[in-house]
Image (cartoon, rainbow, N blue to C red):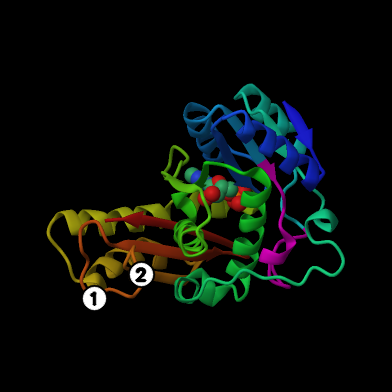
Amino acid sequence: MEIIKDPAAFQKQSQAWRAEGLRVALVPTMGALHAGHFKLIECARQMADRVSVSIFLNPIQFGPNEDLAKYPKTFEADAAGCRERGVDAIFAPVPGDVYPPGFQTTVHVDGLTSPLCGRSRPGHFDGVTTVVLKLLLLGQPSVALFGWKDAQQLLVIRRMARDLNVPVEIMGIEIVREADGLAMSSRNVYLKPEERREAPRIHKGLEAARKAFQAGERDTDKLLAAARKPIEECPLMRIDYLEARSLETLEELKEAKAGDTLIAAAVFLGSTRLIDNIRL
Ligand code: AMP
């Protein structure tokens, strides 16, 4: 496994693989890898001849009051986990090489970035699409894998690739959870023990909505009320958003439709913001 810091060297390696006719998969991450990331990597390994994992804590997708400075960094363990799973290359650039002096280009996806995390985190998705397009151009993958954990991000990146004719398949991978249902996240390490105990309430709420849907309920006000209940019962939690939206357009839905409904939540537990979702 190679560890490549220089963007030009990574691009050269990727181009050489493609020139040999090899199928390349890319898994973009911000590091602090956990079982969710490793699931993406394992899927990539099964689908491609060469697997690249990028580990880059992308400063431009963080707002001024967000957790960029304290975001966990575990590069040695990340590299060991990648090596164990047969990753061919880790791309781990420094911010100054990704955004050299004079960098002045932004990739902006419109409508899909307005609601949900786009409303709570202004500019976040511009940072995401800008870095992901760069990673796709450097890594030259036939397929890039993203988690449904960040459902809006996945939809935004798919739209960007489609709108800009980027020759890549954007594949979504199911959310990996802890045994108690909490969606795995690099940010879970921020939780105090009492917050960690309560955190599965988010998943519990979403599953209550799913159960109501399966029992025939279609009114999203009622589904969201079911989802809200276990979360609002916890005084440590504050809902940032909990909404039902079309998976296609992210428009708000009054009525849930099988195959086209995303129920997405962002919840503060103390100062930690957790996101989760289900698809109906
Ligand atoms: P991050 O390092 O948080 O930027 O995540 C890198 C990729 O891993 C993104 O595509 C995430 O959606 C995905 N990911 C993060 N957590 C999970 C999880 N629990 N299950 C599945 N995918 C995940």
Q: Is residue 263 above or below residue 136?
A: below
Numbered-mark total: 2
Measured from the top left, where is residue 106 in percent x and y?
Answer: 67, 70
> What residue sits right under mark 2 in the picture?
249
Q: What element carries label 2?
A: loop
Which picture quadrant has residue 215? Answer: bottom left
- Which residue position holds label 1? 254
Residue at disc 1, secondary structure? loop
Residue shown at the point (56%, 40%) measured from the top left: 37
Please tell me which of labels 1 and 2 falls first in the chain. 2
CB under 8 Å between discs 1 and 2: no
Q: Residue 9, relative to residue 123: is it above or below?
A: above
Does the rendering let one see residue 78?
no
Q: Nearer the viewer, residue 24 or 1?
A: 24
Q: What residue type is labelled 1?
A: Lys
Point out the stretch of residues depicted in magenta.
54-69
Residue that appears at 35% across and 55% down = 278
Q: In this view, does 74 lie above or below 113?
A: above
